[in-house]
Amino acid sequence: MEMRGTYRLGPWDAASEATLDVRAGSIDEAIATALTAIARAAAGEVGEGTAGTEASSGVSVPIRGQGQDVGEVVFQLAGDLLAQIDANGTGLRNVRLDGLLDAQPGFTAWGYALGSADGPPPPETLSLVESPVVTDADGETTVRVRLTKGA
């Protein structure tokens, strides 16, 4: 598996919120890694890891997002992803981003949640507290996401 990006989901605080930090070599890789980490968090995983390209998958469920900036696009993609996980189960554990289009004004992105259709439902509902912060500097893209559970 080729490495795409790394992520770290911090501990859940008293308000049932946690911060997800992602690092990757490009915006596309960072978005796909962030969404994969969110899918894994929805399945109850915590901590850190890497996300890579997936060779094959049993199920592919389309996801899409639009927004005025990349953070808003990630917010919309994550909302669509979490809705698909609620409907299809936590077997959807990886994300492939197929496109990020600068539509001027704004951005549109699309891709697929990948995995299996036989996963259990999420242990708790996850959502994003606010639009993620996406930065691109010195050949590295970072994404910071605030997640909340049970909301």
Image (cartoon, rainbow, N blue to C red):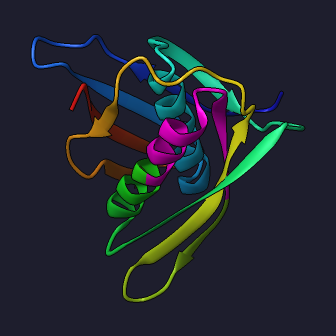
**Residue 107, percent across and down?**
45, 75
Q: Looking at the figure, which quarter contains the C terminus?
A: top left
Question: In the figure, residue 33 lies in which quadrant?
Answer: top right
**Residue 20, percent across and down?**
36, 28
Query: In this rendering, is residue 16 above or below 85?
Result: above
Q: Looking at the figure, which quarter contains the N terminus?
A: top right
Instruction: Tell me what residue is drawn at x 35 percent, y 54 percent.
Output: 75
Residue 94 is a magenta residue: yes
Query: In this rendering, is residue 73 above or below 94?
Result: below
Left or right: residue 144 versus residue 46 is left
Left or right: residue 148 versus residue 34 is left
Residue extending farthest to the left is: 15
Residue 50 is a magenta residue: no
Instruction: Tell me what residue is drawn at x 44 percent, y 12 percent.
Output: 46
Query: In this rendering, is residue 53 above or below 141?
Result: above
Does residue 95 show up?
Answer: yes
The residues colored magenta run 80-97
